[in-house]
Amino acid sequence: MEKFEVYLKKNAGYLLIIAFLVAYILTKFALFAVLCALSIVGLFVYETYRGVEEGGWKKELEEIVVAVLAGVILWYGAGFLLHTSAPLDSIVSCSMLPRIDRGDMVVLSGSEVSAPTAEVNSSEWEEIKERMNTNFTCGPCTQHGAYNFSICRVGCGGSCLTAVDGKPVFSDSNDSLFSYNYELCKLKGDKGDILNDVCVKSINIKGKKYYENFSNDVVVYEPLENSVFVGSTIHRALVKISVDGKLYYLIKGDNNEVLDVQAPGKGVQSGEGTCIFSAESRVNKPVPQENVKGKVIFKAPYLGYLKLFLWGYVGTPQGCDTVIET
């Protein structure tokens, strides 16, 4: 019993961090996330103070410098071995559910990304880019002719999708160069409720259809300037496009209804519960090879929460209460 008490006293800070982390995982209560972050900071301050008391400031500073240098060497060493500038990352959102969850820590590799490749020339590519942006029209939900869609539910007062680029949702496209293929999909809520949703299941490029494929690699990329997305994004590669030898990626989150390049940057409400979402002000562009940091080769559940909490990501983001069923 005495040994157990000594163990508890010696490791109380670490046990407290683990306890708050487990409590957050079980409840998703933001207070536990804040307490976990404060415990990490408090433990660092306490260990530093105790080190100063035992060995003085000089020795403690030396140990801190050594620890920082060891971390830097480990980071860049892992990056060198894995051929990436960012060997580790944490998942912030729920856009990759159910295969990768918020709070997972992922290991990245800079090796070749596994996804099908489409070949186009530069003139075709310019035409394709002009057709990638999408306008979504949201309106009143009716029994027939309107569909559940997250952009409408969240951004337009719980409305439904009524049109895509001004046409009925499932209109056939005769564009052989580039088009999106929409299908009905099922959206499952955290309480077990099921909604009919609309999802892009494939795209056409030069007459060939490329399907969403969950065996394709998940990549981490940095969005280009003036994009809708900000900061590192972790989604799955749908297709690689080779433009006269230069690679670009079209990417989609497993739990997103549309591709990243379709994410609207602007919403305009026109009254009577009708909104139009478009990419007029900001737009996600196809991702060039140099903006891809790496692909996911391993994930460790929950460990990424520690980084999220320290960086202030304590609230549960939108989209974590629903999962697109496949």
Image (tube, rainbow, N blue to C red):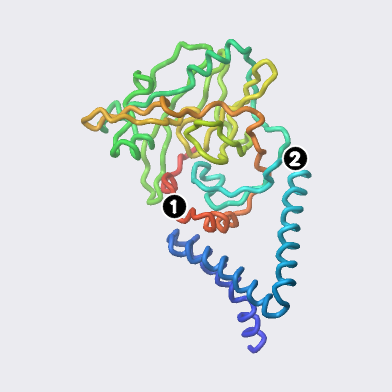
Residue 83's mark? 2
Which residue position is annotated with label 1? 316
Residue 303: name its quadrant.
Answer: bottom right
> Measured from the top left, where is residue 71 in percent x and y?
72, 56
Q: Are marks 2 and 1 in contact (CB under 8 Å)?
A: no
Total count of labels:
2
Q: Residue at x 41, y 50 (%)?
A: 190
Nearer the N terminus, badge 2 or badge 1? 2
Kind of residue sitting beneath label 2: His
Q: Is residue 192 above or below residue 179?
A: below
User: What is the CA distance from the residue labelled 2 to the residue labelled 1?
Assistant: 32 Å
Please name whichever residue, 195 or 243, is drawn nearer the observer in this view of the structure: 243
Kind of residue sitting beneath label 1: Thr
Q: Residues within 10 Å of mark 2 (few under 14, many from 20)?
A: some
Please identify the quadrant where the N terminus is shown: bottom right
Please name whichever residue, 54 or 123, is drawn nearer the observer in this view of the structure: 54
